[in-house]
Image (cartoon, rainbow, N blue to C red):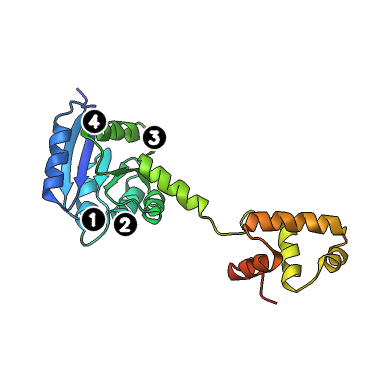
Amino acid sequence: MTDRRIRLFLVDDHPMVRAGLAAMIDAERDLLRVGEAGSGADAVRLVPPAGPDVVLMDLVMPDMDGITATARLSRAMPATRFVILTSIVDPGEIDRAIEAGAAGYILKTVSSQELVSVIRAVHGGRRVLAPEVTDALVAKRQRRTPGTDLTQRERELLSLMARGLNNQEIADELAIAVPTVKFHITNILAKLQVDNRTEAVLLAIKHRIVSAP
């Protein structure tokens, strides 16, 4: 009879953490612990022969961090799902983990039953991020670089503003009406969240939206 249990491999440099995770896994009838490692380097060596369905991977470890180990293993084991289990909520690390192939990014404050649910979910093909992780990613997106939402026409106007052209000169240069120039400038100021033309030009130059004259 085929064993349909989800095969789990644990990677964490703290023996007490591994012991706690092992006890949690062993208490679930549909989970089977198939191995452990105490570092990223050991994981790269020991995970493939164990053939797990899901790997719970710590982030910060000696030798090699969990994301680097995940990147190496996920390329060689596309059917295996990797879950980063950490106390670190950093948007840069979260992005790195996802790019490395992690199907989950969960905090160590999660309860045992919540973690079991995550394991089952990622094994079923879902991506699972802790709520705090999702919040961090959203906050990062909201702190985007100024000017990313400017249209091509608005960028053209900014370039002319940076050269010191007034509204009439800009209108002549672009063959548009002065009211249209004023409309575009109002939008530019709103998008850059500045109060006047000078601030808009200085911000645009600082963030290389336009070149300095």
Indicate whether 173 appears above or below 71.
Answer: below
Q: Which residue is mark 3?
A: 126
Q: Which residue is mark 4?
A: 113
**Numbered label tally:** 4
Residue type at numbered disc 2: Thr
Q: Earlier in the sequence, mark 3 or mark 4?
A: 4
Q: Nearer the viewer, mark 3 or mark 4?
A: 4
Determine the residue positioned at 32% across, 45% down: 77
Q: Earlier in the sequence, mark 2 or mark 4?
A: 2
Indicate whether 182 appears above or below 106.
Answer: below
The CA distance from mark 2 to mark 3 is 22 Å
Q: Which residue is mark 1?
A: 40
Q: Residue 26, how many percent across, how many down? A: 14, 32
Indicate whether 122 appears above or below 47.
Answer: above
Secondary structure under badge 3?
loop
Q: Earlier in the sequence, mark 2 or mark 3?
A: 2
The CA distance from mark 2 to mark 4 is 28 Å
Dot 4, how many residues are within 10 Å of its Cα: few (below 14), some (14-19), or many (20+)? few
Secondary structure under badge 2?
helix
Q: Which residue is mark 2?
A: 68
Q: In which quadrant of the rendered image does the C terminus lie?
A: bottom right
Determine the residue positioned at 31% across, 57% down: 68
The CA distance from mark 1 to mark 3 is 24 Å
Q: Which mark is residue 22?
A: none
Residue type at numbered disc 1: Gly
Identify the residue at the far front of this view.
195
Q: Are marks 2 and 3 in contact (CB under 8 Å)?
A: no
